[in-house]
Image (cartoon, rainbow, N blue to C red):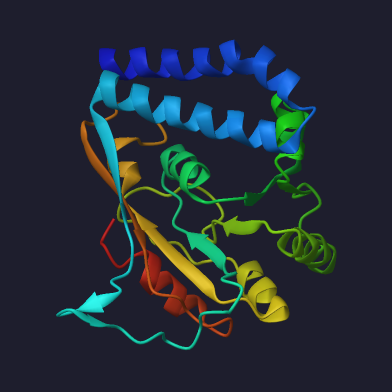
Amino acid sequence: MLRTFIFKLCFYLIFILWAPIITLALISKKLTRIIAVSMATQILFFARITVGVNYRVHYPATEENGISILPNGNIRSDGKSIIAAKHMSVMEVIILTKIVRNFTFIIKRELMWIPIYGWVFGRLGLIPVNRSRGKTNMNKLLTVTAKKIMDGYTLIVFPEGTRTKPGSHPVLKRGLLFIAHELKLPIQPVGTDTGIYWPRRGKMRSGTANVYFEPLLPSTATLEEIGEAINRHGA
């Protein structure tokens, strides 16, 4: 538990110590993103040296027995898709921030009110939604999301809606299907077991957390197909 405390202390100190630097970086979207990725890299570094939590990213096979696997027909010529990721920990958020170019997330509006970092989220192009009024205005969200994608962003969503415990497979939210279908974007499922090593609460465990990029699904995929893909590795 001591190592977990040391890491979490480092975690919060990173946000405090980087605050003046990233505030100055707000003059440039590109610079803000560079600093944000640098912070993500530093957090993962301290997770490794203080608690012994490392990570590995797995991508779909491109060859089988030395023979190239044919595309499944869902790959767009512009390479765009929606990443639908299992959400177990803040760790996969940080990993995706580090490895996905021009990422954007749909986040709670309240996060935009955090001093300094609320401005950072806006500069990074994150998409706030107001959940306090119940049902999200999907048409408005669709319009904003479509513009972000046209501007070169890659949308990352967590269809479970909240962080889940290992072994938990809640019903996925339908908003993902609406966006994918309306924008004709294939869905890139991403599974993970980060919650085993970096849980929402309690002691962290040493080991290698995994992030699994699964083969693309069509924009017409069902919630069951998406759920099966992001839970394929048993976490």
- Residue 114, image x, y percentages: 72, 26
Q: Is residue 135 left or right of residue 66?
A: right
Asked if 169 appears above or below 93 in the picture, the reply is: below
Q: Quadrant of residue 206?
A: top left
Q: Is residue 30 left or right of residue 71?
A: right
Quadrant in which the C terminus is drawn: bottom left
Q: Is residue 54 left or right of residue 220?
A: left
At 48% from the left and 68% from the top, the residue drawn is 188
At 47% from the left and 79% from the top, the residue drawn is 217
Asked if 122 appears above or below 48 in the picture, the reply is: below
Asked if 12 appears above or below 57 in the picture, the reply is: above
At 26% from the left and 63% from the top, the residue drawn is 233
Q: Is residue 216 visible?
A: yes
Q: Quadrant of residue 209?
A: top left
Asked if 33 appears above or below 135 in the picture, the reply is: above
- Residue 55, image x, y percentages: 29, 41
- Residue 123, image x, y percentages: 75, 37
At 23% from the left and 31% from the top, the residue drawn is 205
- Residue 2, image x, y percentages: 27, 12
Q: Toward the viewer: 227 or 154?
A: 154
Q: Toward the viewer: 87 or 37?
A: 37
Q: Is residue 168 visible?
A: no
Q: Quadrant of residue 159?
A: bottom right
Q: Toward the viewer: 97 or 194?
A: 97
In the image, farthest residue toward the left: 65
